[in-house]
Amino acid sequence: MKRNCQNGFTLIELLTTVVIIGLVSAMAVPRFTQAYERMEFKSANKDMTSTLRLARSLAISNKEVFGVNFNSDTKIVSLFKKDPSSVLLNTFETADSLIRVDSMGHNFNTLTTDLTDNTISFRPNGSAIFSGGGNIISMATTEDLIGIYQFNILASTGRVKTTGSYY
C-alpha cells in the first residue's frame, strides 16, 4: 500500500505566519519603548536615593558631616565630605571634598528642591541638616511618558522616603 504524504508548509502558510508575527511585533514596540523609558527614569531616581542614603551612612560610619548638593540648572547631584573647619554645615563650598558626581540624564526636565541652598548634610548621628522643607522633586518627560518622583528627607532621623508616579 502506497501513501501519498506531504510534509512541510506551503509558501502561503509561511508568509501568513511572518506577516502575523510582524503585525504583533509592530504593536508591541511602543510598549517596549515606554517600559524602557520608565526603567531608565526609575533607575536614575534610585541612584539619587542611593546617593542620599550613602551620604547618611558615611556620616554615621566616619563620624563626620557628609552632604548632597543638587544643581537644578545642570541636573547634577554631588556627594561631598564637609570640610571640618567650615562654619556653615548645610552649604556646599569649594573647600569640601567631592566624593561622587552624578548626572541625571537627558530626559530630566526638572530637578527642584525646597531647600535654601539645594544642599542636605548629614550629622554623625544620622540626622539631616537643611533649611527648608526637605523635599526634592524630579520630573522627566518624553514622547510616551511623564514621570514625577518626590523625595522627602526627615530632619530628625535623616531617613529618605520616595514616591513616584507615571502618566
Image: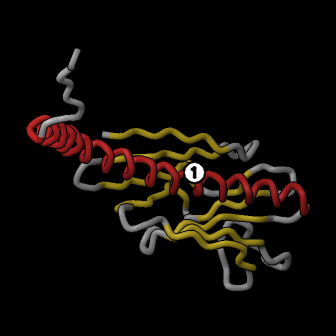
Q: Mark 1 = which residue?
A: 46
Nearer the observer, 158 or 22: 22
Q: Is residue 17 left or right of residue 62?
A: left
- The residue at the point 34 percent across, 62 percent down is 109
- The residue at the point 71 percent across, 61 percent down is 121
Q: Quadrant of residue 99?
A: bottom right
- The residue at the point 66 percent across, 54 percent down is 50
Nearer the observer, 88 or 19: 19
Q: Quadrant of residue 167?
A: top left
**Callout count:** 1
- The residue at the point 90 percent across, 63 percent down is 62
Residue 166 showing in the rendered view? yes
Nearer the observer, 36 or 158: 36
Q: Is residue 78 left or right of residue 19?
A: right
Residue at the farthest top position: 1
Q: Is residue 144 above or below residue 116?
A: above
Amino acid type at circle 1 is Lys
Spot occupied by residue 149 in the image (x, y as percentages of width and height): 46, 46
Residue 117 showing in the rendered view? no
Nearer the observer, 25 or 152: 25
Spot occupied by residue 132 in the image (x, y as percentages of width and height): 56, 53
Q: Secondary structure at mark 1?
A: helix
Q: How is the image coloured?
A: secondary structure
Residue at the farthest front position: 1
Spot occupied by residue 58 in the image (x, y as percentages of width and height): 82, 60
Q: How crowded is the residue under tag 1: few (<14 C-alpha within 10 Å), some, or many (20+)?
A: few
Spot occupied by residue 56 in the image (x, y as percentages of width and height): 76, 54
